[in-house]
Image (cartoon, rainbow, N blue to C red):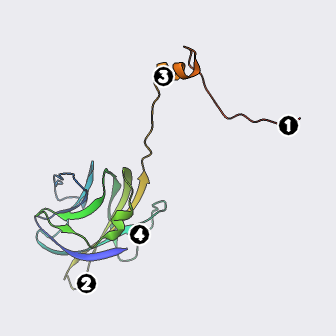
Amino acid sequence: MDTAPISVAHQQYGIVSDGVVSLYEGDGTTMTTPSRGYLTVTPSTEYGPVEVSIDVVMRKLDDFVPEGWTLEGEGSFEAIDELRVKTTDGQVWKQFPSLKGIQFPSKVLYRAYRQYLSDGSIERHRLELTPRFIVPTHQVDEGDLANEIGDDAPSVLGLHVFKDD
C-alpha cells in the first residue's frame, strides 16, 4: 500500500489515466465519482492536506471494512492508460508507484474509505483498487473465414480428441 499526504485544490483530486483530460466533477455529496479514464475523489476539505493510501489488491473485493474506517463509495472506472494521482491545480503526485502495476485497458473496481483523526488534524482516504484486465477481442468477418476454409457457409472448428486404437 502506498501512502502519502497530498495537497488538494478546489476540493478534489483524481486517479487519472495518462493523457486523459479529467473534468473534475461531483457535487460534493459523495466521496467518489467514476468516469471513463479516471476517478474523481472529493475530500471534505477544499484546500489543504489529505493523507491518501492506495492499495492495489488482486482479490475479490468483499464487504470487510477496516477498523476505524468508513466505507464512502464503491464502483468501477476504466483505466485506458497508466494511472496517476493528480490534483485540480495540475500537480501529479508520484508517491503512488503501485498504480504502475495496473495493466490497461482495465476495468478497475474500487472501494473508497474515509477516516478523520481524533484531533481533527487531517482527513485520511484509503482506496482499494482491483483491476480487471480487458482482453481485446478480434472479430472475423464471415467472408474472410469462408475464404480460409474454401466454403461460403459458416463453419465451427472445435477441440478434437484423437484416440489410438
Few, some or many residues within 10 Å of mark 3 (<14, 14–19, 20+)? few
Q: Is residue 153 visible?
A: yes
Amino acid type of the residue that numbered disc 1 sits on in the rendered structure: Asp
Looking at the rendered image, the disc whose residue lies closer to the viewer, 1 or 2, is 1
Instruction: Tell me the quadrant of the picture where the N terminus can be found.
Output: bottom left
- Identify residue for label 4: 65
Q: Which mark is residue 118?
A: 2
Q: Residue at x 43, y 51 (%)?
A: 133
- Identify residue for label 1: 164
Amino acid type of the residue that numbered disc 2 sits on in the rendered structure: Ser
Sequence-wise, the earlier of marks 2 and 3 is 2
Secondary structure of residue under mark 1 = loop
Looking at the rendered image, the disc whose residue lies closer to the viewer, 2 or 3, is 3
Few, some or many residues within 10 Å of mark 4 (<14, 14–19, 20+)? few
Asked if the residue under mark 3 is in contact with the one under mark 2, i.e. CB atoms within 8 Å, the reply is: no
Few, some or many residues within 10 Å of mark 1 (<14, 14–19, 20+)? few
Q: CA distance from mark 2 to mark 4?
A: 19 Å
Q: Residue at x 40, y 73 (%)?
A: 66
Amino acid type of the residue that numbered disc 4 sits on in the rendered structure: Val
Q: CA distance from mark 1 to mark 2?
A: 74 Å
Q: Residue at x 20, y 82 (%)?
A: 120
Instruction: Tell me the quadrant of the picture where the C terminus can be found.
Output: top right
Q: Which mark is residue 144?
A: 3
Secondary structure of residue under mark 2 = loop
Looking at the rendered image, the disc whose residue lies closer to the viewer, 1 or 4, is 1
Secondary structure of residue under mark 4 = loop
Sequence-wise, the earlier of marks 4 and 3 is 4
Sequence-wise, the earlier of marks 1 and 2 is 2
